Image (cartoon, helix red, strand yellow):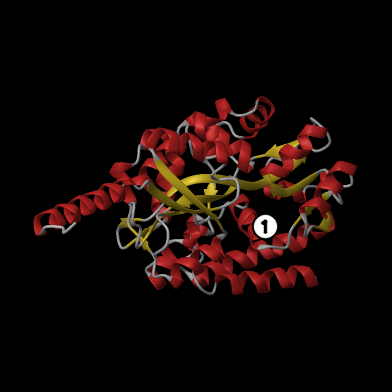
Amino acid sequence: MKRTRSSFLATVTAASALLIALGGAQAEELRLLTWGGYAPDDVVAMFEEETGIDVQVTLSNNEEMIAKLRATDGGGFDLAQPSQDRIAGAQEEYGIYKPMDVSKINGDLFIASMLEGTKKNTAFDGEVYGVPHVWGTSGLVVDTKKAPEVKDYVDLCSEAVAGKVSYRLKRPTLIGFAFSMGMDPFAAYGDTAAYQTMMEKVGEKLIECKPNVKAYWTGGDALINLLRSGEVVAAMAWDTGGWKLNEENPDITFVAPSSGALGWIDTFVLPAKTQNEEAAYKWINFVMQPEIAAKITASAGNFTASKGADAFAEEALKTRFQGSFPQEAIDNIKWYPPVPAGLEDIEGKILDRVQAS
């Protein structure tokens, strides 16, 4: 049967319409570049059901995130989660991120001090590039029965705990002791000479403190065993390590130092070539809801910047968290800013001197 021109055109038109319809029916997608535990399956499923947006999760770490985004000039993903000290410098050098429109983020869902601190620490050329998500700290892990007087980093040098303390010969120890000695190392980041003088003073204190040190720990398991055995009664360590020991021994727990715990934050940032910015903002506002954030805490092991999410955490973890971090301790956390070039060389020489003393 011979097909007329009009029927042919009608067929082509119908086929084109079908292709357009099929294209429009394709599911919207959010491509997420994140850490293990930050996008658990149950949270992804809840988001997909609520929004109709498919979430494609790629697990990574700071170095890999930056490498992936550098390789594509900020393409391939719609939302990424580097630590806050890996944003401004990477943006200045590689231009792999785009500024955030904070008006599209529900600020009421965030712990205010964390939100403001992260906005400040991720700023570049007057624009905000990141908002906080998962966080953690280092501070003190203390046997509160055997070393009740240890409340700050310099207390590790007191005679009462001689020979029974531990910390790493790493930059967090220098930073923590500096704050504990009444100085502000982060404020000196822009003045190399002032930072050198400050670190010299801290180095002298650590040399003076050396007789108190049972061991300079290098691995978390080794430190936990020292605290578990009672050979060490106070140490500089991470919050999660202290809470782990608290499960076994209620006398041992994480203590936020009076001069402030040292905090890291993994953020939300927009890659420069994000293709679904609106979905990215929807994900941020979804996972920062307290009940949802508590699920991420259960998955990742660390708390989030979601205000009130600790109330929905597993009961024992919630009790430990609230015991270590009353609101004033949260507001006193010293968040790591980006490290300027040259400072780590200064720190390394100071630590070498302490080691050799």
Give x and y (percent) for residue 332. Answer: 53, 41
Can residue 232 be seen in this snapshot?
A: no
What residue do we see at 53% from left, 49% from top? 334
Q: Residues within 10 Å of mark 1 (few under 14, many from 20)?
A: many
Near-viewer residue (355 or 299): 299
Quadrant location of the N terminus? bottom left
Residue wearing tag 1: 173
317 relative to 257, above or below: above
* Of the pair 253 and 205, the residue shown nearer to us: 253
Q: Name the quadrant containing residue 147.
A: top right
Quarter holding the C terminus is bottom right
Is 8 located above or below residue 294 in the figure? below
Res. 107 in view = yes
User: Is 98 on the left-hand or right-hand side of 332?
Assistant: left
Q: Amino acid at mark 1?
A: Thr
Q: Secondary structure at mark 1?
A: helix
Q: Residue at 61% of width from left, 65% of height from top? A: 199
x and y percentages locating residue 198 in the rendered image: 58, 64
353 left or right of 106 in image: right
